[in-house]
Image (cartoon, grey):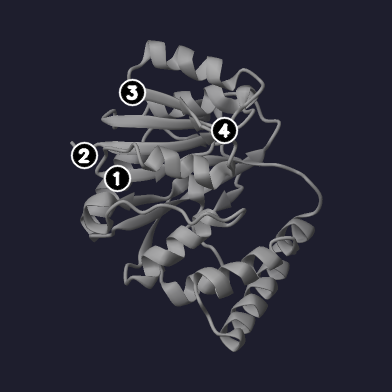
Amino acid sequence: MPLVSVVMPVYNSAATLGAAVRSVLTQTHSDLELLVTDDKSSDGSMDLLMEFARQDKRVLPESAPEQGGAGRARNLAIERARGDYIAFLDSDDMWLPEKTERQIEFAAAGNAPLTFTSYYKMDADHEGESTDFIPNGRVVRAREYVDYRTMLVRDYIGALTAMYDRNILGTRLMPEMRKRQDYALWLSIMRDGAAARGLSEPLAVYRAHQAGSLSSNKMSLVPYNWSLYREHERLSVPRATRALAGAVWQSLRNSRI
C-alpha cells in the first residue's frame, strides 16, 4: 500500500480545522500521514492539533519557526514527508472518504505523476463534516488532461485535490512566493514534461469565502500572475503579455457564469 503524505498549512483555523483533519483520518485508504505546519496561530489551533496527535499517531504537527505564509508552511511539511505521494489540503477544506483511494487507483491506471479531481463548492459558513455534505450541484469539474501551455492561461487544478507521485517526480517544493505558490508548483512540474490528468469524480469540498465580488478577487491576482510569468517561468514580455491577457479573459468569463 503506498503511503500518502498529506500537507496542511494552518493559521488561526480552529473553527474549521477539526472537520478538515477528520476528513483525512477517515479516508478509506488509511496508510497516510498528516503533516501539519502551524504558522504561529493565536487561536488555539496548535492545541487542537496536539490533541489529534495524541489520539492518532498519523497526525504530525509542527510549529513554524517564524510566520512565513502558507507556501512556506507547506514546504516545511513537504520536507518532513516520507510518502510515495504528496497530497494537499487546506485547513478549511475537506475530503470525501474515498478521495485518496480513488485517486491512487486513477494515478496508477493512467501512469500520471500529477493528478487532480473535481470538487464541490460550498459556502464558508456551512457546518458539518464532509460526510454530512449534501451535493447541491455546485461542482468544479476537472479537465481530463492539462498541459503546460493550457495551464499558463488558467490554473485548472484545485489545490485541495492535487497529488503528485514522489517516486517519479522527486520531492517538489513550492516556490517562495507571496501568492500563487501552488500554481507555480504545477507549472514547474509540467514545464519539466509531465502533464496533469483529472479525475471527473468530485472527491473534495471547498469552502468558498465571500470577500468581495468574484471578478474583483480574480483581478487582484493579476500582478501575482505577471510576477509568476516573468520571474518564475522566465517568459518573454510578449509571451507573458499574451498569457496574462488570456488569464484575465478567462477570469472575467468565468465570473459571469
Alpha-carbon span between mark 4 and mark 1: 23 Å
Question: Of the residues under marks 2 and 3, which one precedes in the sequence?
Answer: 2
Q: Residue at x 64, y 82 (%)?
A: 241
Residue topped by disc 1: 85
Q: Is residue 246 left or right of residue 6?
A: right
- Tell me, yes or no, whether the two marked residues, 1 and 2, touch with CB atoms within 8 Å: yes
- Say which amino acid is labelled 2: Pro
Viewed as shown, does residue 126 lie left or right of 205?
right
Element under label 3? loop
Q: Is residue 75 above or below residue 30?
A: below
Q: CA distance from mark 4 to mark 2?
A: 29 Å
Is residue 238 visible in this depiction of the protein? Answer: yes
Give x and y (percent) for residue 31: 26, 30
Residue at x 35%, y 67% (from the top left corner): 195
Earlier sequence position, callout 1 versus callout 2: 2
Q: Which residue is mark 3?
A: 58
Nearer the N terminus, badge 4 or badge 1? 4
Q: Residues within 10 Å of mark 1 (few under 14, many from 20)?
A: many
| Residue 2's disc number | 2
Q: Amino acid at mark 4?
A: Asp
Query: What's under tag 3, amino acid-wise?
Result: Arg
Q: Quadrant of residue 219?
A: bottom right
Q: Residue at x 23, y 57 (%)?
A: 168
Question: Within 10 angstroms of label 2, few (less than 14), some, or many (20 or more) residues?
Answer: few
Percent position (x, y) of residue 81? 32, 38
What is the spatial separation of the Cα atoms under label 1 and label 3, in whole angstroms?
A: 15 Å
Q: Secondary structure at mark 4?
A: loop
